[in-house]
Image (tube, coloured by chain):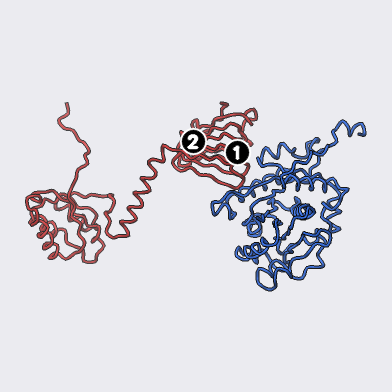
Amino acid sequence: MSTLELKGNLLTLMVLHLQETNIESITEQLAEKISKAPMFFQHAPIVIDLHAVQNDDNSVDVHDVVKVVRTAGLMPIAIRGGNPQQREIALSLNLGLLTHTTPTPHSLIEELEQKEEKEEEQSIIPMSSMCKIVTHPIRSGQRVVALNSDLIVLGTVSHGAEVLAHRHIHIYGPLRGRAFAGINGDKEARIFCQQFNAELLSIAGKYRVNEEFPENLLSQSVQVYLKGNDLEIEPL
Amino acid sequence: MSKIIVVTSGKGGVGKTTTSAAFATGLALRGIPTVVIDFDVGLRNLDLVMGCERRVVYDFINIINGEGNLNQALIKDRRVDSLYILPASQTRNKDALTLKGVAKVLEALKKRFEYIICDSPAGIEHGAIMAMYFADEALIITNPEVSSVRDSDRIVGMLASKTRRAVQDMAPVKEYLLLTRYSAKRVENGDMLSVDDVTDILALPMLGIIPESESVLHASNSGTPITLDNESDAGMAYLDVVARFLGEDPPVRKKKSLFSRLIGR
């Protein structure tokens, strides 16, 4: 029997964001905040975030900040950000170092950027279960891309046209152009087509050109998938 | 409502100008007010095929630049009453065509003509885009060979994305396929793609098939639109194209079968 267990846990922690380096005003403003709910702040663990001030020429002395925070009744447990010097001091004070966390927004612009990022992420999530359906023929020189989804083409993919998808590609008309499935490296992606006359096939970056296709499969219904490092073309 | 029709192909030498001249003449022969515009600025040919090269004073670019008025540039055909030609400039290049300028000229022409035929230059660059941008309908000219078919496919893709109708989310440009320089004999020999091959690849409604004919070359050189040559099979085929375009249903002209040709009909 093991005597202990180590587990990751997501906790809600208070973070003190330092916006400027003047230790007097830090002391003053911290005292003011705490005076509003002294019980709430009593012995509360807190992380000190130095992102906003780490590049200042006379950045804060971590000794001073920790002293101020302790005096205020809080328990500093780690710092986030900070220049190498500050991080060294934090270690000497037995504080943890938090790294690689997304910096919290310090300006409206950063906030907007983060919001956009978040929105992008969000719009991607439901997309992954959807697919892009194209009902018109895809002509020579045209390129259709399905991001984070399957691509279904009901018409022809002409010579010189390109269809690309992060996931599978299904083509119900003749495939005469180029098809790229799993373009972000998804080795499980497949290409299905009703009439196989492609110029080029690619799955997760592995490709084969027309000259290498087995002749008996041309104009047939086929599926294409990755077997090891080779593209397999198989009749349906 | 007047209609703007672009005659286009992507590839050069497939018969855009011949078709523009023949088609416009065919429409005008029915008394429909028709104008045909040469968009091939710098390589103008339409005036030659229409036989009016010596009457060009002002041209399309002059009108766009406001250096003359439309009436000065429009050349009235001497053979067919309701037919006019707007020639291109030979001394400028395609950059002289601007969307605004073309719009201005087309707007003015719309008041006078029922059909405005735009003879596109080859290629997919600025000149071709200017010719197709305002089109309501398009005649895609294709020869029965792979490179021509592929270029036509490319042009059809552009009609669906680069035209005013596409940009403004209106009903798409109505497209018709016209197969020119077709030789049934060479198809039989396997030298040319067949009608079925071409329609299979392009998937467009076929407006007509123009047979390869020596009379076309002769007509071009003599400055006579082929539709004015009553003897020419190509001219007859173009008249059928016009009829089909106008919604009529002319009977398919009997082609000589291999058998009848063998026994000397």
Which secondary structure lies at badge 1? loop
At a point 34% along the width and 55% down the height, the residue shown is: A113
Q: Secondary structure at mark 2?
A: loop
Amino acid under label 2?
Answer: His
Q: Nearer the viewer, residue B7 or A156?
A: B7
| Residue B121 seen in this snapshot | no
Determine which quarter of the picture holds residue B237: top right
Q: State which chain disc 2 sits on.
A: A
x%, y% of residue A126?
38, 40
Indicate the amino acid at tag 1. Answer: Thr
Q: CA distance from mark 2 to mark 1?
A: 17 Å
Q: Which chain is red?
A: A
Q: Is residue B255 left or right of residue A5?
A: right
Q: Is residue A32 among what the camera can see? A: yes
Counting every numbered tag in the picture gives 2
Crowding around mark 2 (Cα neighbors within 10 Å: few <14, some 14 to 19, many 20+) is many
Label 2 sits on residue: A168
Classed neighbour count for the residue bearing mark 1: other residues with Cα under 10 Å, few (<14), some (14–19), many (≥20)? many
- Chain B shade in the render: blue
Residue marked by disc 1: A156
To the question of a shared chain for discs 2 and 1, the answer is: yes
